[in-house]
């Protein structure tokens, strides 16, 4: 994950509604941390249909935007703490 700059959804994960049997939902995702220095405040991800793009193609197209969004969220949290 650190080498790529993002994490991926566990391919063995299956979706489904709580209380119902699990089923393959056909989704995949990438995620980046909301990192504030040494602290990780959370993460942000994008989910898409597995058949639309491979992880590598999707990351090449959208990873920078996802990282920018993460940085903007962390900056907003910092601003709120400063008040």
Image (cartoon, rainbow, N blue to C red):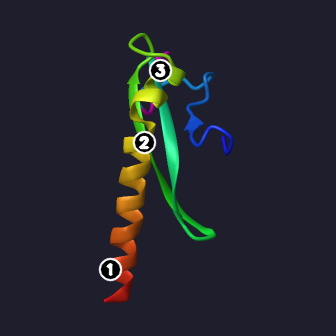
- The mark lying in front, picked from 2 and 1, is 2
Residue at x-position 33% and y-position 70%: 76
Answer with mark 2 or mark 3, whichever residue precedes in sequence: 3
Label 3: few (<14), some (14–19) or many (≥20) C-alpha neighbours in 10 Å = few
Picture coordinates of residue 59 (x, y %)?
48, 30
The stretch drawn in magenta includes residue 47? no
Query: Dot 2 corresponds to which residue?
Result: 64
The reply to whether residue 77 is in sight is: yes
Label 1, on which residue? 80
Q: Which residues are magenta?
A: 18-25
Residue closer to the observer: 83 or 2 = 2
Secondary structure under tag 2 reads helix
* Vertical placement of residue 61 versus 25, above or below: below
- In primary-sequence order, the first of circles 2 and 1 is 2
Main SS of the magenta segment?
A: loop
Res. 57 mark: 3
């Amino acid at each position: 994950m650190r080498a790529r700059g993002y994490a991926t959804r566990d391919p063995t994960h299956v979706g489904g509604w709580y209380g119902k049997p699990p089923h393959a939902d056909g989704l995949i995702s990438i995620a980046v941390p909301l990192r504030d220095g040494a602290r990780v405040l959370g993460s942000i991800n994008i989910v898409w249909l597995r058949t639309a793009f491979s992880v590598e193609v999707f990351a090449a197209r959208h990873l920078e935007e996802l990282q920018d969004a993460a940085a903007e969220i962390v900056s907003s949290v910092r601003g709120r703490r400063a008040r």
